[in-house]
Amino acid sequence: MTLLPTSTSTDIEERQPRVAVLPIGSFEQHGRYLPLITDTVIACVIAREIADAYAVHLLPPITVSCSHEHGSWPGTVSISSRTLSAVIEDIRESLTRSGIEKLVIVNGHGGNYVLSNVVQEANVDGPHMSLFPLSSDWEQARQRGGLVSDRHGDMHAGEIETSVLLHAAPELVRSGYESADHDGGARRFLLTLGMGAYTESGVIGYPSHATAAKGKTVLTSLTQGFAVHLEALGERSDKEQITPGSDEGAAVSRARQGSGRK
């Protein structure tokens, strides 16, 4: 799988996509068996699957983000939330000048809390930006993939991340994940104390349960679930996943009515 975009300017001119997809990862520790670039690879894999399934403009990734909670481990690099927000805004303005007014952020790092605020602010005057996957998207993917861990317990370098890499980039997974399970507990003061207060290895999760098959199903679920995010932005898709009468379908319908769209 080619993770980086390979389209030419002519390709974009001919396709005239209305939505751009921006993967955002991180460069932070993921234990002894996953690389520092793990979150970026996962974001790129998800974004590539989306680009293969929908008419979107795939952008290259932002590879360094807000990983301050991992700062006690060698190799981790961070930028401030202000910088990340500013970069996204610059990208959005550049896309708008080129005629693409909708942007979906594919976030691969849970510590990028600022992204929720960025998206909220961008949508004050109407739907222009979306954040994907949401917690509900991840939860659905976990259920469909048959993962044995939950999202809280499997926070970092665990079953889901290792499964995705075993499927999409197995050459990046080193031995050792089979015996690296660690329960990080409630982690009540994670924002105050950082990851180091809850794990020596850098792992919080259950990578021993990871399989490539689970990773494949997780990605399939996320790709299918992306359709409802396009709909929320006012875009149609031939892979529409909205179920009539569902909470998601009702919410999108109300939003469209409020904006005057039918």
Image: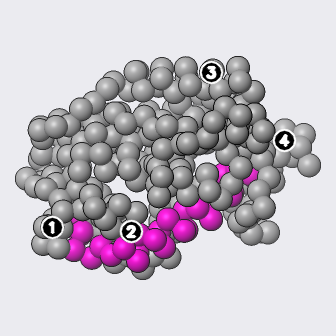
Residue for badge 3? 94
- Which is more N-terminal, label 2 or label 1? 2
- Which is more N-terminal, label 1 or label 3? 3
* Marking on residue 167: 2
Q: Specify whether 178 is left or right of 110.
A: left
Magenta stretch bounds: 205-231
Circles 3 and 1, Cβ within 8 Å, touching? The answer is no
Three-letter residue code for mark 1: Ser
Q: Secondary structure at mark 3?
A: helix
Q: Quadrant of residue 168?
A: bottom left
Residue for badge 1? 175
- Image spot of residue 160 (x, y percent): 35, 65
Residue 192 shown in magenta: no
Residue 214 shown in magenta: yes
Three-letter residue code for mark 3: Ser
* Marking on residue 203: none
Q: Secondary structure at mark 1?
A: loop
User: Whole-Å distance between the Cαs marked 3 and 4?
Assistant: 28 Å
- Which is more N-terminal, label 1 or label 4? 1
Q: Specify whether 180 is left or right of 92.
A: left
Look at 65% across and 26% down and name the residue there.
95
Q: Quadrant of residue 250?
A: bottom right
User: Whole-Å distance between the Cαs marked 4 and 2?
Assistant: 42 Å
Is 54 above or below relative to 21?
Answer: below
Q: What is the crowding at mark 4: few (fewer than 14 residues within 10 Å), some, or many (at least 20)?
A: few
Looking at this view, is 255 or 217 the one in front? Answer: 217
- Which is more N-terminal, label 2 or label 4? 2
- Image spot of residue 47 (x, y percent): 53, 50
